[in-house]
Amino acid sequence: MTESVRKEIDGLRREIERHNRLYYVEARPEISDTEFDRLLKRLEQLEQEHPEYDSPDSPTHKVGGEPIEGFETVEHRLPMLSIDNVYDTDAVREFDVRVRKFLQRDEPLDYTVEYKIDGVALSVTYENGLLARAVTRGDGRQGDDITHNARTIGGVPLRLQTDSPPAVLEIRGEAFIANSDFAHVRAEQKARNETPFANPRNATAGAIKLLDPKQCAKRRLRFLAHGTGYTEGIAFETHVEFLDLLREMGVPTTPHVKSYRGIDAALEHGQELIENLHSLDFEVDGLVIKVNSFALRDELGATSKSPRWLIAYKWEKYEAVTQIEDITIQVGKTGTLTPVAHLTPVKIAGTTVSRASLHNRDELQRLGVRIGDHVVVEKAGKIIPHVVRVEEDQRTGEETEFAFPERCPECGGDVVQDEGGVYVRCINPNCPAQLRESLRFFASRQAMDIEGLGIKRIEQLIEAGLLTSFADVYRLKDKQEKLLELERMGEKSLENLLAGIEQSRSRPMWRLLTALNIRHVGASNAQVLADRFGTLDEIAAQSEETLAEVDEIGPVIARSVYEFFHSDVGRKMVDELREAGLNFGTPVERREEGPKPLEGKTIVVTGSLTRFTRDEVKEFIHRLGGKASSSVSKKTDYLVAGEKAGSKLEKARELGVRVITEQDLHDMADGKMPVAETPDTETPDSRAPDTGASEDASPKGES
């Protein structure tokens, strides 16, 4: 009997640890909270009945022990320094310049980019695999021992899941309350007639300092690791390797961390992280960019306040509470069904917000949003506003759940979920919503740039039966009598519309490729493909493998391009546009090109221009053989400075980069200003705008 009890206890502990790992580390739980609680209660019962089998690393000890009398102050074996904060990408690039200058390296470095969680910094130390101590950051030199509360935090295992644990492993990370848990905590507070917490970070800070761990456990704190402190018996070559090892040992880490070669690639990934903020269930107030190599970190060292090998790219956060008046479904140009929250208008950071995307069905379910709910809407910097969480404590019972449609709301067609993805799409190629949105994109400035063909005119032409495909745009000239019968279509309007359509026939082939609305293919990828293969037909003739080998393309884009050109819909679309006389490009070997005065030159544009939009000047530089870059470095050949040029102009002067005006760029194109005779950095300053002093140094902030 005794042996069977011991086996059941051991089995329950392993099962509970497995489910904790699935929940906190891998984010793919297999059982409900109720089922998990049932396992935990059974283990508690057996341990109470058989105390001889109790163990300090049992999962039951995560629910909290006895209250303590006070906090002990503990000195950090390695200081927990603060991080330098910056607030724009130029400053991030300046950080890269400083790092490489300190290391005396010209080649790009490997950087990691990760979310900066808005929580409470903790140091958690394991000795021989067992949780030994957890300490707050404090003043960076010493902090409070909160081990009693750390035992209750989700994601802080009591024992590392490894057969060969290091003698000492100090893990640094962030304690936080998930937005979904915070909503439940506030609702429970209201039910007890208590004043709800203002925000997750304050609630976390308060929970960490509670003397009773059972009360801390009720706050539902979690932990994500992002760094290391003092260690013995273990070593890592890179930050990515360290995070991978932590996850293997059952410790959750900040999500989506990868290594990128060079600061531009790191910032590009950072933009992807920013665009996916809505998918997170925790508060974020920036990104952290780190040198990946531990050896290089050792070379870089630290100042008295901050390590030299990392920087925090932060933004101001603004939020407000408003009510969801309705939820509707928007069908996009690729058939994606996107739920949209219609909000009671509210001002956030100076702009009125009345709509917010709920992104996809999974996001809708994760948030638990209902029509009538009060929600927190956040706007961080220039990021599109998104719904952070539901204020469950404000529910009245009159809210209604939103049923995600099982068929396309526009055409009634079948919908499917992307394989391995989260988006639900209408697969009816004749869906009117897809036609409307794809035509809008086709005519937009980033694609065929057809003046006079805006969304209202597109809707009018579709309703009149005059537009059913891209090729129909070019058949409108044969239907002028019908067009003149339309409301708000006079002879002058018609003349302008047809002129805009005619001009679009000669747009560069890469614009046509962009306009075809192939998934994952944007303007920059289209230009890469156009430069490599010359014609649309040549791109269509390539194998998936050949496309994937092109720089900046890769397997995902290659598969999408290949499938489009080998589909019945794609073939028909291309044939019709060929018949319409659009520019399909020129074969690479026979391409007749004009003069390329900027061949091999890297150009950065900053400030406001008078003749170009930002997209137009990039295309202009590209046409002259140059490369349009977004950052100033030693490899930059020219900086085109418009009005209010800002920090890029200052940096160009510091690095000795040639500064020219918008007129100079035109003169180069016309041959009036030979590139070899471009004035040096001193000469054009009288012509370049005076922008004043550079920005003040950024303040320091706690990591």
Image (cartoon, rainbow, N blue to C red):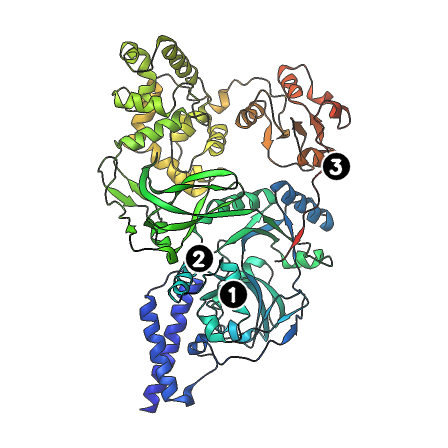
Up-down relation of residue 588 to residue 558 (above or below): above
Q: Residue furthest left?
A: 412
Q: Which label belongs to residue 179?
A: 2
Callout in the foreground (2, 3): 2
Callout in the foreground (1, 2): 2
Mark 1 and mark 2 lie on one chain; the one further toward the N terminus is 2
Q: Position of residue 34 (x, y in %)?
A: 32, 69
Q: Secondary structure at mark 1?
A: helix
Residue 245 visible to an observer of this rendering: no
Residue 37 left/right relative to 386: left
Q: Secondary structure at mark 3?
A: helix
Q: CA distance from mark 1 to mark 2?
A: 24 Å
Q: Which label belongs to residue 654?
A: 3
Mark 1 and mark 3 lie on one chain; the one further toward the N terminus is 1
Q: Position of residue 346 (x, y in %)?
A: 44, 42
Q: Position of residue 305 (x, y in %)?
A: 71, 58
Give the residue type that dot 3 points to.
Answer: Glu
Q: Are marks 2 and 3 in contact (CB under 8 Å)?
A: no
- Where the N terminus falls, by quadrant? bottom left
Q: CA distance from mark 1 to mark 3?
A: 42 Å
Q: Residue at x 35, y 72 (%)?
A: 37
Residue denoted by label 1: 246
Name the foreground residue: 81 vs 351.
Answer: 351
Q: Which label belongs to residue 601?
A: none
Give the residue type that dot 1 points to.
Answer: Leu
Q: CA distance from mark 2 to mark 3?
A: 45 Å
